[in-house]
Image (tube, helix red, strand yellow):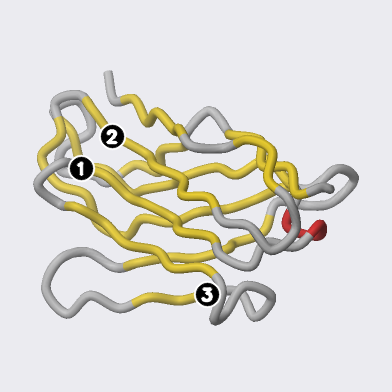
């Protein structure tokens, strides 16, 4: 059974920084794109950042976080990270990691997997 476990959320003051981590575990054969989404109260879930699989790695960011957030991944550890700088109150949301994973049970398909969600609160 594939699991994605997040860590690193919490309360931070405006202008502060946090780093979210997400670890995928299980009988994993391959992971393609990985990303972070967020959902604020009363709003739809939105893509924050995404990163492609190994090789010619490329990243994509929501306009609202460009220049402040950085996504990265460690393929050897099956992990994805989101470094968040210059945080604003409007960044307050539950953050979810996401990945397309090919595992022993799904092979040859890649199935979309989600983390449990991690609350980030930006407030003074």
Name which residue lies at 14% across and 26% down. 27
Question: Where residue 61 is drawn, which disc sits there?
Answer: 3
Q: Picture quarter containing residue 42?
A: top right
The answer to which of marks 1 and 2 sits earlier in the sequence is 2
Residue at image coords 37%, 52% = 81
Residue receiving disc 2: 24
Say which label, 2 or 3, has the lower sequence index.
2
Residue 20 lies, in percent from the top left, at: 46, 45
* The residue positioned farthest toward the right in the image shown: 42
Asked if marks 1 and 2 touch (Cβ < 8 Å), the reply is yes
Q: Is residue 56 left or right of residue 7?
A: left
Assign a secondary structure to mark 1: loop
What is the quadrant of the N terminus in the image?
A: top left
Pointers 2 and 3 in contact (CB under 8 A)?
no
Residue closest to the eye, 9 or 6: 9
Q: Quadrant of residue 5?
A: top left
Lateral position of residue 110 relative to residue 38, left or right = left
Vertical placement of 28 versus 98: above or below?
A: above
Q: Which element carries disc 3, helix, strand or loop?
A: strand
Disc 1: which residue: 78
The residue under the point 30% across, 35% down is 23
Circle 3 packing at 10 Å, graded few (<14), some (14-19), many (20+), is some
């Amino acid at each position: 059974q594939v699991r994605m476990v997040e860590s690193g959320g919490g309360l931070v003051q405006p202008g502060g920084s946090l780093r979210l981590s997400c670890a995928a575990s299980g009988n994993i054969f391959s992971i393609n794109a990985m990303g972070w989404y967020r959902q604020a109260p009363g709003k739809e879930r939105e893509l924050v950042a995404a990163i492609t699989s190994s090789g010619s790695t490329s990243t994509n960011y929501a306009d609202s976080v460009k220049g402040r957030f950085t996504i990265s991944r460690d393929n050897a550890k099956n992990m994805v990270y989101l470094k968040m700088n210059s945080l604003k109150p409007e960044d307050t949301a539950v953050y979810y990691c996401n990945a397309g994973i090919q595992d022993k049970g799904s092979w040859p398909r890649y199935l979309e997997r989600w983390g449990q969600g991690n609350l980030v609160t930006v407030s003074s």
